[in-house]
Amino acid sequence: MVDPQRVGISGFSRTVWFVSYLLTHSETTKFRTAVLTDGIDGGYFEYIAQQLTEFDEDNGGKAPFGKEGLALWMQESPSFHLDHLCLPLRLVSIEDRLAQWEWFVAERLQKKPVELIEIPDGTHMLEKPSDRYIAMQGIVDWYRFWLQGYERPDPEVSDQYKRWEHLRELQDAGAKATGPAQDNASNPN
């Protein structure tokens, strides 16, 4: 009943870490696209930049220092496995750009399809209707574009589709480079 080529996944707040881990560590679970919104990812950069020591528990029970601690983090932390990510990724940053920055830069450096949307004056639960619209309509548009090949016929959003067409080109180039056996996000259209 579900077309596996048309399934996306989202994470918000703390669930960003769980989705991040799934996307970077699962060899069997495949998604076509993902959206991560204003959350923690259990990554090394976040640990250092924001001193989120709760990540010790998530990444093997030790701080990422010394031979044993760093080895555990390299095994468990999603940010050390971003080379495994091969799907279009939308990152939504609210208040703090650094929370999504590691993933954004890593994916860009690998020429993978990634977009970072910032809502700098927003609050975590997005209280202003205009902020909610940016985040929620953006998620709907993103999923419809990547999962259904649909573009909303609204001239005010034509620029987003131009960006996404470029991201599709990156996705297609990556799919050709890895071959069909490893491409878990190929375009079914």
Image (cartoon, rainbow, N blue to C red):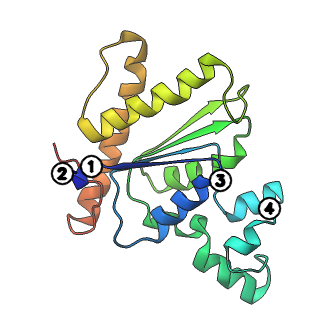
> Which tag, 3 or 1, sits closer to the chain's start?
3
Residue identifier under label 3: 14
Taking the view exactly as shown, the residue that stands out farthest to the front is 1
Residue 98 located left or right of residue 88: right
Rendered position, 138 above or below 188: above
Query: In the image, which is nearer the foreground, mark 3 or mark 2?
Result: 2
- Which percent across, then down, holds residue 51? 83, 60
- Numbered label attached to residue 1: 2
Q: Is residue 182 above or below residue 137?
A: below
CA–CA distance in space, label 3 to label 2: 30 Å
Q: Is residue 93 left or right of residue 161?
A: right
Please report whichever mark, 4 or 1, sits nearer to the chain's N-terminal start: 4
Residue linked to disc 1 = 172
Neighbor class of circle 4 (other Cα within 10 Å; few <14, some 14-19, many 20+) is: few
Q: Nearer the viewer, mark 2 or mark 1?
A: 2
Q: Is residue 146 above or below residue 7?
A: above
If you read the primary sequence from the N terminus, does the residue marked by circle 3 or circle 2 appear first? 2
Front in this rendered view, residue 122 or 68: 122
Q: Position of residue 37 (x, y in %)?
A: 58, 42
Q: Callout 3 environment at 10 Å: few (<14), some (14 to 19), or many (20+)?
A: some
Image quadrant in which you'd find residue 70: bottom right
State the residue at coordinates (73%, 35%).
Answer: 95
Quarter where residue 46 is shown: bottom right
What residue is shown at x 16% (from left), y 42% (from top)?
A: 189
- The type of residue carrying mark 4 is Ile
Q: CA distance from mark 4 to mark 2?
A: 44 Å
